[in-house]
Amino acid sequence: MTTANEIFSETLPEKLKTNDDIDDIDAVYEFHIGDDVWNIDFTKSSDWVSEGEHGDFDCKITVSEDDFVGMWEGDLSGQQLFMMGKISVEGDMGLALKLQKFIG
């Protein structure tokens, strides 16, 4: 099974390098997944993904690791998880909707 750590440390950084859909995102996402915290900082020109709290996020997502991996692998949608109360969003909900551009 893929882990969130593998996604954030290996797969996601590579996927972002080749994704033109993220050019219009100028925000910081903070992901609380189980006991781990990751952030994606699109206000920087590169090296967007890092571990640990950013503190100055525009959108914070809290979700279990299993549900995050399910979203990443396309088995679950963020909307499904939100409606079921399995994912919480703090901050800009519009930014949460843009997650589809680079997750899943």
Image: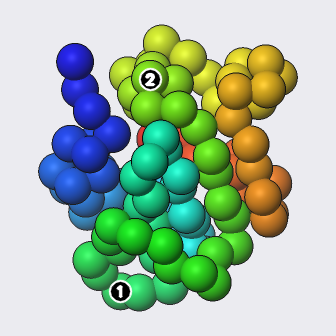
Position above or below: 41 against 77: below
At label 1, counting other C-alpha atoms closer than 10 Å, the crowd grade (few under 14, some 14-19, many 20 or more) is few
Q: Is residue 95 left or right of residue 29?
A: right
Residue at image location 40% in from the left, 70% down from the top: 52
Q: Is residue 24 visible?
A: no
Q: CA distance from mark 2 to mark 1?
A: 30 Å
Residue at image location 63% in from the left, 51% down from the top: 61
Residue that numbered label 2 is attached to: 66
What colour scheme has been applied to the protein in the rendered image?
A: rainbow
Q: Nearer the viewer, residue 77 or 8?
A: 8
Seen from this angle, which residue lies furthest top?
75
> Percent x, y for residue 84?
79, 18
Residue that numbered label 1 is attached to: 45
Q: Is residue 25 left or right of residue 34?
A: right
Position above or below: 44 against 104: below
Element marked by disc 2: helix
Q: Is residue 5 left or right of residue 23?
A: left
At label 2, counting other C-alpha atoms closer than 10 Å, the crowd grade (few under 14, some 14-19, many 20 or more) is some
Q: Nearer the viewer, residue 51 or 58?
A: 51
Q: Nearer the viewer, residue 101 or 79?
A: 79
Screen quadrant of the N terminus? top left
- Residue type, numbered disc 2: Asp
> Percent x, y for residue 8?
30, 51
Comes first in the chain, label 2 or label 1: 1
> Percent x, y for residue 89?
75, 50
